[in-house]
Image (cartoon, rainbow, N blue to C red):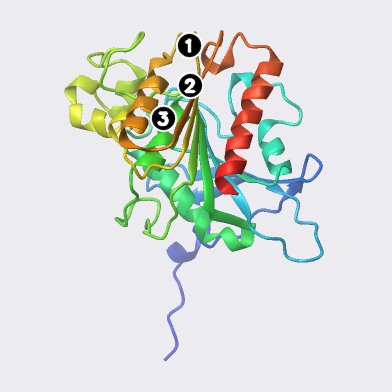
């Protein structure tokens, strides 16, 4: 019996990200290939979610071993930001930070997630899980080993990176595709100047304020939705099986007080999880106020951590 021809409705749309052809890789910096604007998930009624990839050149005559993955989560108060931006302190670098990581032998995925004007928590966290699922599904084509993933985030992205590592994924279907238990958990976490507690007043933030960036991300003032605020607070999710954390935070941060990283470090230590906290003297948010050489040192220390946990 002949199968019926697919309808126009069936074929008119772009291929699903799970099986769409990958875009061609473009050589950029020496030893680095880039794939820009790769769709990884579809949201009904919303924009496709995309990621950018920086990959080491596969120019060996034999098939190289899959490389570890850095899953990068951008900042921007959950309200704005770009997936190819590691923050203020690195914007003038040439080559940029992601090309440097790729040249060092790591794949880097800079990932879109839904911002607070599009959807509220846990949507951005679901998106990161969906991105890791897609990267795992397409890992053979990309030459990456998502079993050796470090998630690295700055500011609000560091908050989401922490939650990705501390909270379990689920097999419940999402708008972005089925999330499978086989999706690997990160082996390590790097956070730069990230929020960790949405339940306690710190700096300019108060849980009662319905107009705060935290409230916009949650969909209500944290004090009005205490269970949701706690679920979105990495300090409340620390546990003994957490992967190693590297927390780096300026001691003069005027936007996200350093006490956020101090509290998360304390919670992880109390739970028996490995954590390193580095207070950066004289640094404001985004490493503002630091000379470039100091930011280079922070990046180098973070890269050394990534090497160590993925070795």
Secondary structure, mark 1, is loop
Q: Residue 296 or 37: which is nearer the viewer?
A: 296
Instruction: Find residue 108 and report its horizontal and vertical position in percent.
Output: 61, 43
Q: CA distance from mark 1 to mark 3?
A: 16 Å
Give the residue displayed 49% in from the left and 55% down from the top: 134
Residue that numbered label 3 is attached to: 159
Give the residue displayed 45% in from the left and 72% down from the top: 6
Mark 3 or mark 1, which is nearer the start of the sequence?
3
Seen in the picture, residue 61 relative to 91 is either above or below; the reply is below
Q: Are marks 3 and 2 in contact (CB under 8 Å)?
A: no
Mark 1 or mark 2, which is nearer the start of the sequence?
2
Give the residue displayed 48% in from the left and 37% down from the top: 189
Give the residue displayed 57% in from the left and 56% down from the top: 145
Seen in the picture, residue 52 relative to 60 is either above or below; the reply is above
Q: Is residue 41 visible?
A: no
Q: CA distance from mark 2 to mark 1?
A: 8 Å
Instruction: Find residue 39 and report its horizontal and vertical position in percent.
Output: 54, 49
Instruction: Find residue 282 and report its horizontal and vertical position in percent.
Output: 56, 8
């Amino acid at each position: 019996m002949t199968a019926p021809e697919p309808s126009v409705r069936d074929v008119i749309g772009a291929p699903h990200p799970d099986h769409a052809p990958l875009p061609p890789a473009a050589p950029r910096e020496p030893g680095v290939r880039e794939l820009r604007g790769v769709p990884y998930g579809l949201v009904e009624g919303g924009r496709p979610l995309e990621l950018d990839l920086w990959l080491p050149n596969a120019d060996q005559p034999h098939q190289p071993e899959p490389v570890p993955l850095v899953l990068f989560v951008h900042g921007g108060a959950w309200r704005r930001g770009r997936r190819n931006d590691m923050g203020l302190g690195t914007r003038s670098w040439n080559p940029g930070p992601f090309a440097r990581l790729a040249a060092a032998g790591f794949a880097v995925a800079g990932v879109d997630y839904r911002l607070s004007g599009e959807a509220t928590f846990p949507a951005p966290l679901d998106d990161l899980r969906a991105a890791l699922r897609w990267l795992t599904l397409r890992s053979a084509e990309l030459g990456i080993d998502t079993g050796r993933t470090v998630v690295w985030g700055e500011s609000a992205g560091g908050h989401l990176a922490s939650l990705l590592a501390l909270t379990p994924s689920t097999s419940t279907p999402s708008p972005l595709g089925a999330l499978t238990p086989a999706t690997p958990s990160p082996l390590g976490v790097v956070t730069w100047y990230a929020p960790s507690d949405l339940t306690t007043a710190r700096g300019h933030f108060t849980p009662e304020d319905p107009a705060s960036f935290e409230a916009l991300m949650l969909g209500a003032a944290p004090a009005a939705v205490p269970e949701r605020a706690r679920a979105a607070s990495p300090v409340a999710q620390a546990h003994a099986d957490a992967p190693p954390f590297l927390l780096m935070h300026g001691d003069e941060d005027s936007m996200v007080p350093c006490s956020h990283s101090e509290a998360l470090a304390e919670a992880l230590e109390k739970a028996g999880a490995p954590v390193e906290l580095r207070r950066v003297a004289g640094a404001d948010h985004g490493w503002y106020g630091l000379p470039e050489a100091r930011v280079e040192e922070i990046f180098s220390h973070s890269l050394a951590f990534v090497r160590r946990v993925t070795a």
